[in-house]
Image (tube, grey):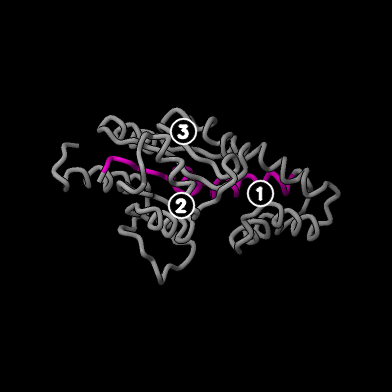
């Protein structure tokens, strides 16, 4: 297996759910939505409405907001990059992988401005060798082409093996496997996984990085 490690962004390298809770509290306060609004927004997010056009359409109707869906969504994309955090130990883990000869890239779905803003605000843009954003490429995980774009920017090819690390069973795990990569799922306990096909399941991306590094040793390579 070549030394290629691809990582999802939201809820893998950064805690998007935590940032979303902060955004929801700010949004409720800014629009004077009253008690229960934060829980409602978080519930809608967890109910499977991650596409923000649909999310803000429902929120606008529920709360009777005057701003358009486009305005609400644009405000969200401007704010979220400033709320996400990347823990120091995650940055250290990425640095250790690269020092050990691994090519590291981020593969993420999402609007270009929001996702690129997160990469820049957290320092992740400079902590990896490459990244592929669905909002830029016009391709969304689990489409294998997005993984291949990221690998190509690392001078590698998914067909030669490597790892995909992420939290989503379809976008990250099924997509990564279809691309020919071994997979590690970050299980945050937010939804059941009766058909989990990941090679490993861990609760923290730092643990996933350790597995990736140790995989080189298991192949008789120095780490």
Q: Which mark is residue 24?
A: 1
**Rendered image quadrant of residue 135:** top right
Residue extending farthest to the left is 220
Q: Is residue 216 left or right of residue 193?
A: left
Q: CA distance from mark 2 to mark 1?
A: 33 Å
- SS type, badge 1: helix
Answer whether residue 104 is magenta in the image: no
Q: Where is mark 3, residue-wise?
A: 124
Q: Are marks 2 and 1 in contact (CB under 8 Å)?
A: no
- SS type, badge 2: helix
**Rendered image quadrant of residue 116:** top right
- Tell me what residue is drawn at x 65 percent, y 60 percent: 44
Q: CA distance from mark 3 to mark 1?
A: 24 Å
- Mark earlier in primary sequence (2, 3): 3
- Residue 165 percent coordinates (x, y): 38, 49
- Residue 109 percent coordinates (x, y): 55, 48
Q: Where is mark 2, residue-wise?
A: 144
Residue extending farthest to the top is 126
Instruction: Please rate how many residues cluster around mark 1, counting C-alpha atoms within 10 Å: few if below 14, some from 14 to 19, many from 20.
Output: some
Q: Is residue 93 above or below residue 51?
A: above
- Tell me what residue is drawn at x 16 percent, y 37 percent: 222
- SS type, badge 3: helix
Between circles 3 and 1, the one closer to the viewer is 3
Instruction: Please rate how many residues cluster around mark 2, counting C-alpha atoms within 10 Å: few if below 14, some from 14 to 19, many from 20.
Output: some
Q: Specify the segment rendered in magenta.
A: 2-29
């Amino acid at each position: 297996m070549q030394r290629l490690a691809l990582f999802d962004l939201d809820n893998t390298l950064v805690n998007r759910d935590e940032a979303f809770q902060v955004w929801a509290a700010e949004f409720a306060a800014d629009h004077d939505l009253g008690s229960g609004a934060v829980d409602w927004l978080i519930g809608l997010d967890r109910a499977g409405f991650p596409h923000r056009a649909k999310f803000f359409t429902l929120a606008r109707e529920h709360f009777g907001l005057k701003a358009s869906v486009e305005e609400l969504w644009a405000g969200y994309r401007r704010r979220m990059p400033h709320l996400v955090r990347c823990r120091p130990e995650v940055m250290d883990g990425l640095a250790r992988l690269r020092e050990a000869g691994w090519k590291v890239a981020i593969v993420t779905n999402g609007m270009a401005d929001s996702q690129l803003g997160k990469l820049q605000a957290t320092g992740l843009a400079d902590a990896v060798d490459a990244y592929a954003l669905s909002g830029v490429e016009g391709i969304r995980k689990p489409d294998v082409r997005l993984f291949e774009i990221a690998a190509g920017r690392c001078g590698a090819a998914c067909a030669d093996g490597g790892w995909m690390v992420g939290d989503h069973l379809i976008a990250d795990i099924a997509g990564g496997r279809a691309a020919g990569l071994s997979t590690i799922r970050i299980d945050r306990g937010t939804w059941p996984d009766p058909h989990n096909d990941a090679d490993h399941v861990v609760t923290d991306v730092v643990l996933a990085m350790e597995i990736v590094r140790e995989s080189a040793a298991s192949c008789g390579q120095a780490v």
